[in-house]
Image: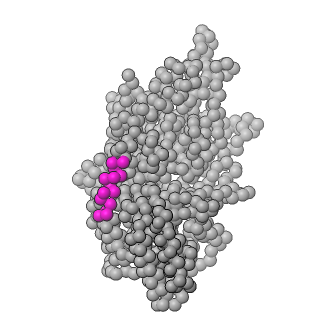
Amino acid sequence: MPCVADWLNNPFSIVQGIFAQNVPNSDWEKKVTEYFKEKLKENNATNWVPSLNDVPVHYLKPNSLVKFRCMVQDMFDPEFYMGVYETVDPNTNARVLHFGKYRDVAECGPQQEIDLNSSQTVTLERQTFYCVPVPGESAWSVVFLNPQLYAYISASQARVSPSTSYTPSRHKRSYEEDEDMDLHPSKQKEQHMGNSPYCGGDIHGCVEPKRLETEASAGHHLISPNCSPPLDLNFPLPGEKGPACLVKVYESWDSFKVNDVLEVYGILSVDPVLSIVNNEERDSSALDPMDCMDTAEEQRVHSPPASLVPRIHVILAQKLQHINPLLPACLNEEESKTCEYLNLTSLFVSNFMAELSPVRAELLGFLTHALLGDSLAAEYLILHLISTVYARRDVLPLGKFTVNLSGCPRNSIFTEHLYRIIQQLVPASYRLQMTIENMNHSRFIPHKDYTANRLVSGVLQLASNTSLVVDETQLEQGQLDATGVHNVTALGNLITWQKVDYDFNYHQMEFPCNINVLITSEGRSLLPSDCQVHLQPQIIPPNMEEYMNSLLTAVLPSVLNKFRIYLSLLRLLDYSISDEVTKAVEEDFVEMRKNDPESVTADDLHRTLLVARFLSLSAGQTTLSRERWLRAKQLEALRKARLQQQKCVNGNEL
């Protein structure tokens, strides 16, 4: 019976055994998938699998089983490979069948040659995804991905103050140490995290720990002999760190698309031969262009050095419904049918819903303090954070709720720290500083590079449910050039239609998205929004930075985790309006129009229904009640009165 070390550290031995027992029956591939699927269902088995998200590549054993949580940034053309091939010994004519699945390089013994003309050869097809870590993934989300990592950080908080630098240990390990590492991959993590500055103090105040190896290997990226000029890993957001991977998918790849977030389990391939082969291909193609149809740039992008861009040959892949590690992976009914822990999931949801009311009250108080005592703005911020596009009617996205928080102080301290608080609440976020410099020089829209045959990423290539905070308080006087105008237009289209038009040179292609956009501004935003809330500070702290910093340090980690679960869970709940309530709302709207025909419009009805929807969900109610409808009307009346008051003070400017 195979032990953990077999299927985890040497999965090829398992595949070889199943292959040998079932050849020439083609069912061997299905049996391999079923074997690993069953193994990963065992208690805490998924935690045994090392993750590329938090373990540097050079600490992982080649050809071992790994996992990777990532976003599909690009899809390359399908490639052919030898699924089954035969080798022959020239001396004895002995023939051996081999499998080519999950391999980059065909296996062949020293006395064997591959018989390319063998009738046993089976040519198959696989798809290659270029995958990157989830853009803007929060530090707390990465930490909670791995329980052992969290346990290590929690234990280390009681130690002396952490180091502020990371220097990977490069000393050679003994064979016994290597064997111990193979059996206990978590020890690899503990070793390389010994001097790691994950947190200064509480875990919820973590600095960005994403893929620490990148900081140590940044120079390696620049001086690699296989890359000249330096290899661009094509991360959508500036300053992102972590491993990019070529993910080889063998089945059901049509069910995945660009920008999907996946969790893949597969065999790690970092064979140095790949780099040698790629160099030889480039050299030979320079001598004889007919040998290779790919350009040198395309070869460089599609076949980068495995030490920089490792390969993962996928055995199991799952499209993630959400990326909050504090929640069960499967929450909706369709996916839960395939989940072994359906009962545990239901229990988790019901238990949390039972204590929803105090969690909402605490979150409202927390955000009220963050918004300088403005409880109305805090209410709308909660509604914004649980909003999501739940359907599309023709081109109209239903459920988007972009909020323009106007009246923000014109200094970066308030908006910067407000973003940091949001960053600690949501799994993925990005703060876009709307300066003339950024607008004119940043690449917002992904575009197709036909020379390299790849999709070049842009800032707006984000995973679903990412929180995008647009800081308009940074905007100063200046001139937008053509790029700046193009970028502002793209932002407006994202907000209005929840889509980004990727540039394919000869045409544009629409990519639907589901991005929560919060705009902070002094006056009314230049960008469109679904709802403008004018901030009315009730307190003016003498030291804004000290005040905002104290909010996060004051909240308990357990409470902060409840906030995180609350915001993610409520976005996944179903919602409906009964016929009876629908009729009552229609009658109420007709009365509102009679009383004030000039100021009450269809847009007001749509917005109030949205507010009522998210207000109901924020209280854990999946249907609209008369009480929630009246409360939504009350909130809208307060918001409009505040805007009207501000208009009277500042003239026409809101």
Between residues 47 and 40, which one lies in front from this camera angle? 40
| Residue plotted at (61% across, 15% down) | 88
The residue stretch that appears in magenta: 346-359
Is residue 351 located in the magenta-colored stretch of the structure? Answer: yes
Q: Kindly tell me whether residue 213 is visible in this rendering.
A: no
Q: Which quadrant of the structure image shows residue 296? A: top right
| Residue plotted at (57% across, 63% down) | 397
Question: Secondary structure of the magenta portion, mostly?
Answer: helix
Q: Quadrant of the N terminus?
A: top left
Would residue 336 be found to the left or right of residue 89 on screen? left
Image coords of residue 242 (percent x, y): 47, 50
| Residue plotted at (70% across, 50% down) | 451
Between residues 140 and 156, which one lies in front from this camera angle? 140
Is residue 266 located in the magenta-colored stretch of the structure? Answer: no
Image coords of residue 76 (percent x, y): 63, 44
Judge whether 34 appears above or below 381 on screen: above
Q: So how many labels did they put on this image?
A: 0
Judge whether 35 appears above or below 542 on screen: above
Image coords of residue 456 (percent x, y): 62, 54
How is the structure coloured here? one colour
Q: Which quadrant of the structure image shows residue 559? A: bottom left
Between residues 645 and 51, which one lies in front from this camera angle? 645
| Residue plotted at (42% across, 41% down) | 339
Image coords of residue 541 (percent x, y): 32, 79
Judge whether 532 appears above or below 422 on screen: below
Between residues 299 and 428, which one lies in front from this camera angle? 428
